[in-house]
Amino acid sequence: MSKTKRFADIFDGLKAAYGTYKIEGSQSNGKNTGKASVVREPRTKALWDEHLSGKGAAIGIIPINEENKVKWGCIDIDEYPLDHKEVVAKIRRMKLPLVVCRSKSGGAHCYLFTTDWITAKEMQEVLNQIAAALG
């Protein structure tokens, strides 16, 4: 399986649309500013390839599929500057099933993945509990 296909399978969601974000500047705290929009057409392999190579537009997958179910969710930590090692250490101490990635603006995205599709409501409830536990 190609890297692109694997990534697309992991970050599956709504087939009919995806988001884009054009960075236009940054705030004094380091957070990027820009314009978000929704493209109402399916994602293509070429779009994924460009995104993963860093050459194309940033794409944002809408995690909720056509049946209002999800396989992943994300806690967005917009704290600047952020000590990513400290965040990862806290998550490990708490034994939380999260994958931490640095966001483009220097914050963190903490992803929760499931094997099967679950309702978006269930994912929100779990993410809210985890976010509260993290502080």
Image (spheres, rainbow, N blue to C red):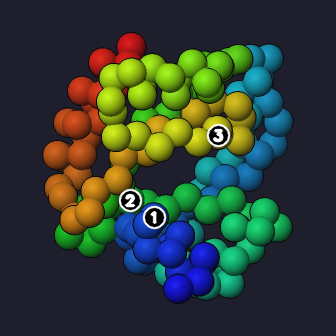
Residue 82, above or below 10 = above
Q: Which mark is residue 11?
A: 1
Q: Mark 3 points at which residue?
A: 103
Q: Which amino acid does label 3 sit on?
A: Ser
Tell me, yes or no, whether the two marked residues, 3 and 2, touch with CB atoms within 8 Å.
no
Residue 49, above or below 72 = below
Q: Which of marks 1 and 2 is in front?
A: 1
Of the image marks 3 and 1, the number of the one nearer the N terminus? 1
The answer to which quarter of the image holds residue 115 is bottom left
Residue 74 makes an appearance in the image: no
Tell me, yes or no, whether the two marked residues, 1 and 2, touch with CB atoms within 8 Å.
yes
Where in the figure is residue 61, as x and y percent of width and height? 49, 62
Residue 129, above or below 67 = above
Task: Identify which residue is drawn at 18% across, 46% down.
Answer: 121
| Number of numbered discs | 3
The answer to which quarter of the image holds residue 91 is top left
Residue 124, above or below 117 = above
Q: Which mark is residue 63?
A: 2
Q: Which amino acid does label 2 sit on?
A: Pro
**Foreground pick, 100 / 123:** 100
Left or right of residue 135, residue 83 in this image: right
User: Helix or strand or loop: what does disc 2 sit on?
Assistant: loop
**Crowding near pointer 1: few (<14 within 10 Å), some, many (20+)?**
some
Task: Identify which residue is drawn at 33% across, 23% down.
Answer: 94
**Crowding near pointer 2: few (<14 within 10 Å), some, many (20+)?**
many
Q: Which of marks 3 and 2 is in front?
A: 3
User: Helix or strand or loop: what does disc 3 sit on?
Assistant: loop
**Crowding near pointer 3: few (<14 within 10 Å), some, many (20+)?**
some
Where in the figure is residue 98, as x and y percent of width and height? 40, 40
**Foreground pick, 9 / 48:** 9
